[in-house]
């Protein structure tokens, strides 16, 4: 048996302290990157699962919002605002009526838009259509109507409250 194939004659050189530190730093960086990646994946899942409870708490916490100077909104236009943590819309219809509704589609939670030329509320995500006066789901995939708020116009602005 020659010396090259004899396992007893293979000698490994000892690692230098610099090589060990480099490996440790690499493993530490790889572990930190793995933790960050896991956290980045877990956070949206946590928010999705925690959101119904959070929305229920915020929904009961806010019962009224005053929109200052909203009474100056032109006819046929909309003002988007926050009612608690959720988006909402105040519509000043061409006939002078004020309507306030939630602005979250009841299908998958996309934000809806008011289309004044068609006098409707439209969800661009899946083509859902709502009545701009009542919030009723007219067509498309929304299973429920938008929530309608009470509105009162005064000198300070427009008061929007839970119905």
Image (cartoon, helix red, strand yellow):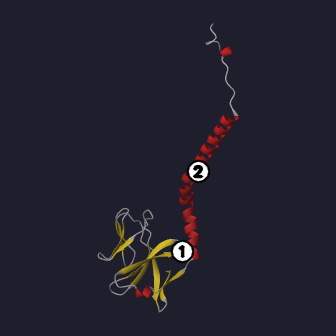
Q: How busy is the neighbourhood of tag 1: few (under 14 within 10 Å), some, or many (20 plus)? A: some
User: Can you give x and y, in whole percent of width and height, for residue 51 in the image?
Assistant: 55, 63
User: Rounded to the nearest whole Å, what is the CA distance between mark 2 and mark 1?
Assistant: 31 Å
User: Can you give x and y, in whole percent of width and height, for residue 1 in the image?
Assistant: 63, 7
State the residue position of label 2: 36
Residue 1 horizontal side relative to residue 64, left or right: right
> Is 84 drawn above or below residue 156 in the view shown?
above
Element carrying mark 1: loop
Residue 117 tag number:
none
At x 55%, y 60%, the residue is 47
User: Can you give x and y, in whole percent of width and height, for residue 86 in the image?
Assistant: 50, 71
User: Can you give x and y, in whole percent of width and height, for residue 127 in the image?
Assistant: 34, 64
Q: Nearer the viewer, residue 64 or 75?
A: 75
Residue 94 horizontal side relative to residue 163, left or right: left
Q: Residue furthest bottom?
A: 155
Q: Nearer the viewer, residue 13 or 43?
A: 13
Q: Residue furthest left?
A: 117
> Is 39 drawn above or below residue 55 in the view shown?
above
At x 60%, y 43%, the residue is 30
Element carrying mark 2: helix
At x 56%, y 69%, the residue is 56
Residue 19 horizontal side relative to residue 106, left or right: right
Q: Earlier in the sequence, mark 2 or mark 1?
A: 2
State the residue position of label 1: 84
Q: Nearer the viewer, residue 36 or 10?
A: 10
Which of labels 2 and 1 is toward the front?
Answer: 2
Q: Nearer the viewer, residue 129 or 6?
A: 6
Quadrant housing residue 105:
bottom left
Q: How busy is the neighbourhood of tag 2: few (under 14 within 10 Å), some, or many (20 plus)? A: few
């Amino acid at each position: 048996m020659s010396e090259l194939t004899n396992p007893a004659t293979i000698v490994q050189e000892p690692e230098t302290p610099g090589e060990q530190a480099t490996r440790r730093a690499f493993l530490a960086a790889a572990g930190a990157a793995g933790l960050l990646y896991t956290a980045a994946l877990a956070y949206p899942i946590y928010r999705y699962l925690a959101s119904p409870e959070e929305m229920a708490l915020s929904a009961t916490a806010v019962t009224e919002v005053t929109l200052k100077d909203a009474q100056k909104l032109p006819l046929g236009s909309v003002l988007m605002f926050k009612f608690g943590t959720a988006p909402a819309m105040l519509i000043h219809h061409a006939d002078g009526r004020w309507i306030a509704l939630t602005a979250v589609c009841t299908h998958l939670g996309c934000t809806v838009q008011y289309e004044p030329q068609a006098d409707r509320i439209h969800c661009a995500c899946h083509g859902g259509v709502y009545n701009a006066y009542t919030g009723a789901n007219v067509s498309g995939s929304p299973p429920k109507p938008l929530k309608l708020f009470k509105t009162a116009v005064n000198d300070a602005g427009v008061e929007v409250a839970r119905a």
